Image (spheres, coloured by chain):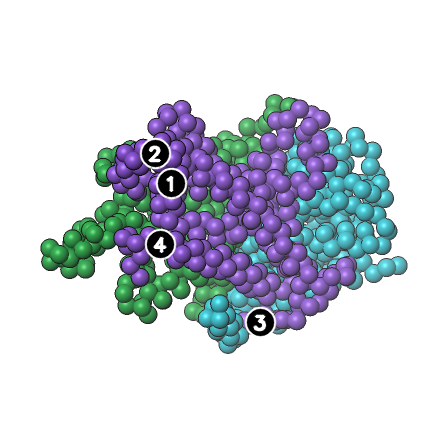
Chain colours: A green, B cyan, C purple
């Protein structure tokens, strides 16, 4: 047990500014990729369910490609290859934002597709019967319900996204986990820094999930 | 599947086509008014980050001299210096694709790498040895038979251990940490009885550990490795400039001062002193700076 | 770009050994599949249980399930992997701890599989819960009305419907587990990412190495995806949008 009595927490205080910068980047990246990803993902889901088959095929191909390659590799390839095609290097941060939005859209689209499919077809018929267009039916009837049904899963995905941002270390951008790791290495106190990082992540993600749960209880559809 | 293969091939050919532009680093720097240094985040004490997240270290100091000379030589009023963190996985692609102009990390100069990139003359040499707990009584590699030995994934020590294992009929159980701090933790928590790595890194880990007196660096040297600053291949102007800067530093004796600053004095972030005197191999190398690869340092006598 | 291409590298021998790099990659693929599939079995069995419990009328059980989910999904996988490997054994009595650290056979594999399985179980559980809750209450009521017990209602009415609804997100999770298994390299499991790092360090042909590894991951995930798509098609329920196509 001496392992624990020997924990050296004195290294945490000087690393705080470092961790704070990392946290800010993690949060910014999560928020941008989440909003961009949900919008793009919903469009992809609608495309996949559209009766126009080339569109459905293209969307399904994109989603499956993105979901089949490890995020780490996608990040690496975007970063290594884009400069070669465009001819000038792109910053790690910009590259990360583009990659995450494009990548997360594939995941959000699968969730939205499941959500749309959870709405009974009778509701679509009802919409059409009272003379609504496709856009109206989707916008006023199907999507709001799909969104509410899938809120817990959307949240889970966002928490995953929040944690996945740690993979940007591969291209040298510094997020919360990377900052903790660097501090752990330079002070040679990895255990202390990992435990501290685990606590920060837990507190943030847990609060987030409480918040959404509260939100959910206010907008839930009673069936 | 087929589609994505085609996609992949298209990308690859796009890579192959966009060749020129990058060959002349000095022209590129002059045109863009900026130079990008590749840095490591935790290659203590060669290249790592301090509490203010600024890259510091022995190699960083030397690279800053190179950058100053570039600025003078190109007669630039301002030269923007960008820092790009690199890892041992991406440093070579980032140098070859033009993202990084000057990699100031801790890269071993070996023949295989010289196919891809060029190196500045060597200013640091490390010996691959092992760290053990003093209480284990281990003093030689031959005592490791059947014991777990830690090393770090994707480092040259792995190759050396493999070669050694084969030659001497000693059978280690290799355990792998994802970085040096993790590998050291394996030694600290008794998952491994020894940690095989560059001796300067071992010395840094020991001096910053909780009980430095518990550990020792022991055993025969598995390999001698020149660590060097990396630049693009086939760029004679830039290579010439880098060579001159380093040769001047060595001739004027300034390099000894820099060495003393990083290896013989307390350094951030913990103000620990590595007390790591310059080896004779390095002294000899600095008398006549060279970019010879590791293979030439390890010729069997 | 002055990159020195060498596509023949895969057939070359590794330094100081008598295998080819291709052997390394296939060994890596084998461990990746082993970790991913064992972890998926753990994740699925625990995830279904926990997800169902979360919707249970019993407060205590629901609380337990909720705590489980929050604990395992709110800390990044890499950190969990580190904690399981380096910190958890220190909580055991000295002798046990030494046994786990030195004598336990395939300790890296066991730790990685357990960690990945529990991590994923929290995510599967959330999807199961979302699936159950997206069903109209009428279905439970109907089940109870025809004389089923609550357990029977879950078994014959709720879960079969819920599963069909969550197949798309579950597919994502199944594909994810192959990719997430790459984190196992952090504790020294010799899977694909581990081998890629070794190979790129050994051969200095990073781009070829990572392209090959990307393709191998893609194939794994693609097969997983097609399998689940087949399942999705076979299990469609008439009357839901899912059956529209």
For disc 3, the chain is C
Total numbered badges shown on the rendered structure: 4
Q: Is residue C81 left or right of residue A19?
A: right
- Relative image position of residue B102 (x, y in whole percent): 57, 60
Q: Which residue is mark 3?
A: C2
Crowd tier of the residue under label 3, counting other residues whose Cα lies within 10 Å: few below 14, some 14–19, many 20 or above: many
Provide the secondary structure element on which disc 3 rests. Answer: loop
Q: Which residue is mark 1?
A: C156
Do marks 1 and 2 share a chain? Answer: yes
Crowd tier of the residue under label 2, counting other residues whose Cα lies within 10 Å: few below 14, some 14–19, many 20 or above: some
| Most distant residue in the right direction | B301
Q: Which residue is mark 4?
A: C236
Q: Quadrant of the image for the C terminus of chain C?
A: bottom left
Q: Which residue is mark 2?
A: C148
Indicate which label's residue lies in the foreground, 2 or 3.
2
Provide the secondary structure element on which disc 1 rests. Answer: helix
């Amino acid at each position: 047990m001496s392992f624990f009595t020997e924990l050296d927490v004195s290294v945490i205080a000087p690393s705080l500014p470092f961790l704070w910068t990392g946290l800010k980047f993690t949060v910014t990246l999560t928020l941008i990729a989440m909003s961009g990803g949900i919008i793009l993902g919903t469009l992809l889901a609608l495309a996949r369910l559209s009766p126009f088959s080339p569109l459905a095929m293209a969307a399904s191909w994109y989603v499956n490609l993105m979901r089949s390659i490890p995020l780490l590799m996608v990040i690496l390839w975007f970063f290594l290859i884009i400069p070669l095609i465009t001819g000038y290097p792109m910053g790690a941060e910009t590259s990360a934002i583009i990659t995450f939005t494009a990548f997360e859209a594939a995941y959000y689209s699968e969730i939205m597709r499941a959500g749309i499919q959870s709405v009974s077809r009778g509701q679509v018929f009802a919409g059409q019967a009272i003379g609504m267009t496709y856009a109206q039916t989707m916008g006023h009837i199907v999507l709001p319900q799909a969104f509410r049904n899938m809120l817990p899963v959307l949240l889970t995905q966002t928490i995953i996204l929040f944690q996945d941002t740690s993979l940007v270390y591969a291209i040298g951008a510094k997020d919360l986990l990377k900052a903790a790791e660097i501090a752990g290495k330079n002070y040679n106190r990895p255990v202390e820094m990992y435990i501290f990082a685990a606590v920060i992540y837990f507190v943030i993600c847990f609060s987030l999930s409480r918040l959404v749960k509260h939100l959910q209880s206010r907008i839930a559809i009673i069936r | 599947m087929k589609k994505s293969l085609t996609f992949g091939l298209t990308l690859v050919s796009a890579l192959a086509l966009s060749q020129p532009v990058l060959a002349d680093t000095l022209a590129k720097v002059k045109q863009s008014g900026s130079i990008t240094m590749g840095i490591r985040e935790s290659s203590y004490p060669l290249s790592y980050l301090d509490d203010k997240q600024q890259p510091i270290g022995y190699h960083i100091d030397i690279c800053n001299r190179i950058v100053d000379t570039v600025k003078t030589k190109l007669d630039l009023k301002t030269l923007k210096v960008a820092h790009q963190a690199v890892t041992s996985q991406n440093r070579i692609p980032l140098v070859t694709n033009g993202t990084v102009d000057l990699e100031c990390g801790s890269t071993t100069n070996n023949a295989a790498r010289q196919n891809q990139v060029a190196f500045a003359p060597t200013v640091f040499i490390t010996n691959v040895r092992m760290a053990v707990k003093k209480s284990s009584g281990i003093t030689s590699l031959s005592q490791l038979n059947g014991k777990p030995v830690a090393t770090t994934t994707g480092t040259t020590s792995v190759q050396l251990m493999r070669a050694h294992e084969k030659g001497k009929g000693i059978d280690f159980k290799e355990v792998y940490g994802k970085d040096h701090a993790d590998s050291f933790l394996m030694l600290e928590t008794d998952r491994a009885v020894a940690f095989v790595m560059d001796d300067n890194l071992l010395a840094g880990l020991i001096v910053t550990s909780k009980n430095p007196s518990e550990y020792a660096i022991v055993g025969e040297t598995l390999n001698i490795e020149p660590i060097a600053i990396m630049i693009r291949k086939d760029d004679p102007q830039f290579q010439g400039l880098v060579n001159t800067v380093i040769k001047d530093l060595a001739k004027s004796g300034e390099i000894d001062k820099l060495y003393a600053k990083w290896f013989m004095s307390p350094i951030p972030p913990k103000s620990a002193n590595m007390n790591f005197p310059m080896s004779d191999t390095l002294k000899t190398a600095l008398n006549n700076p060279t970019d010879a690869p590791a293979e030439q340092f390890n010729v069997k006598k | 770009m002055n990159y020195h291409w060498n596509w023949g590298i895969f057939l070359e021998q590794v330094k100081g050994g008598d295998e080819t790099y291709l052997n390394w990659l296939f060994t890596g693929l084998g461990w990746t599949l082993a970790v991913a599939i064992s972890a998926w079995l753990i994740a699925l069995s625990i995830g279904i249980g926990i997800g169902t419990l979360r919707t249970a009328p019993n407060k205590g059980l629901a609380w337990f399930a909720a705590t489980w989910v929050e604990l395992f999904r709110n800390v990044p996988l890499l950190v969990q992997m580190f904690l399981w490997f380096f910190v958890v054994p220190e909580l055991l009595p000295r002798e046990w701890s030494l046994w786990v650290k030195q004598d336990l056979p395939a300790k890296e594999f066991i730790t990685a599989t357990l960690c990945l399985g529990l991590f994923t179980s929290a995510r599967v559980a959330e999807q199961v819960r979302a699936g159950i809750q997206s069903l109209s209450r009428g279905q439970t009521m109907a089940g109870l009305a025809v004389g089923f017990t609550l357990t029977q209602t879950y078994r014959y009415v709720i879960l079969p419907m819920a599963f069909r609804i969550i197949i798309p997100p579950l597919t994502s999770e199944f594909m994810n587990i192959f990719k997430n298994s790459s984190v196992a390299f952090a504790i020294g499991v010799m899977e694909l990412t581990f081998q890629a790092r070794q190979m790129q360090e050994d051969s200095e042909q990073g781009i070829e190495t990572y392209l090959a590894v990307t393709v191998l991951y893609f194939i794994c995930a693609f097969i997983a995806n097609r399998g689940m798509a087949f399942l999705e098609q076979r299990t469609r329920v008439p009357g839901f949008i899912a059956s529209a196509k």
